[in-house]
Image (spheres, rainbow, N blue to C red):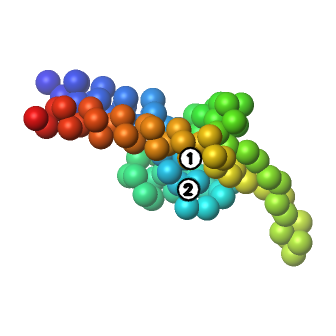
Amino acid sequence: MRMPLDRLRQKLTKEVMWLYILKLLQERPMYGYEIKDQIKNHFNWSPTTITSYVVLYKLESGGYVRTEVRGDDSTKVKRKYYIITESGETLIGEGIAFLREVLGKLET
């Protein structure tokens, strides 16, 4: 009978991955693969690489994150860093407030 709990976990992880990404980007700009790793380290679940990039693309299209290409002069490696925007800050605040509201109702 754990299927409902498994579905809840999926809904609160994969299906709202944007919350996790924006939360991480509040700390500092990160590149895509780093975001995927940090989700695992901070939140104890592992999104697929493709899912991470799909969500990042949608966040960028919506204006919630912007990108900046940065390079390392010593290695010549260039990476696309994601940076949270003011709209992204507003969105995560509203998302967390909504989750608190729902949790508060469930706890009463």
Residue at image position (76%, 47%) is 67
6 with respect to 44 (left or right): left
Q: Residues within 10 Å of mark 2 (few under 14, many from 20)?
A: some
Q: Is residue 21 left or right of residue 107?
A: right
Q: Quadrant of the C terminus?
A: top left
Between 7 and 68, the residue placed more toward the observer is 68
Badge 1 marks a residue whose secondary structure is: helix
- Furthest-bottom residue in view? 74
Q: Can you identify the residue that label 1 sits on?
A: 89
What secondary structure is marked by label 2? helix
Instruction: Work out which quarter of the rendered image holds the N terminus and state it.
Output: top left
Q: Are marks 2 and 1 in contact (CB under 8 Å)?
A: yes
Q: Residues within 10 Å of mark 1 (few under 14, many from 20)?
A: some
Choose mark 2 or mark 1, whichever is in front: 1
Find residue 21 and report its horizontal and vertical position in percent: 54, 46
In the rendered view, does 102 fall on the left or right side of 29?
Answer: left
Question: Does residue 97 appear anywhere in the picture?
Answer: yes
Query: Sequence-wise, which precedes: disc 2 or disc 1?
Result: 2
Whether 71 is drawn above or below 52: the answer is below
Q: Report the amino acid beneath label 1.
A: Glu
Residue position marked by numbered label 2 in the rendering: 26
Q: Is residue 74 shown above or below 96? A: below
Q: Amino acid at mark 2?
A: Gln
From the viewer's side, name the closer residue of 75 and 105: 105
Q: Is residue 3 above or below residue 32?
A: above
**Coordinates of residue 87 in the picture (x, y in percent):** 62, 40
- Write the residue at 54% across / 42% down: 90
Q: Which image quarter: residue 15?
A: top left
Q: Position of residue 26 (x, y in %)?
A: 56, 56
Q: Residue at x 43, y 57 (%)?
A: 42
CA separation, marks 2 and 1? 8 Å
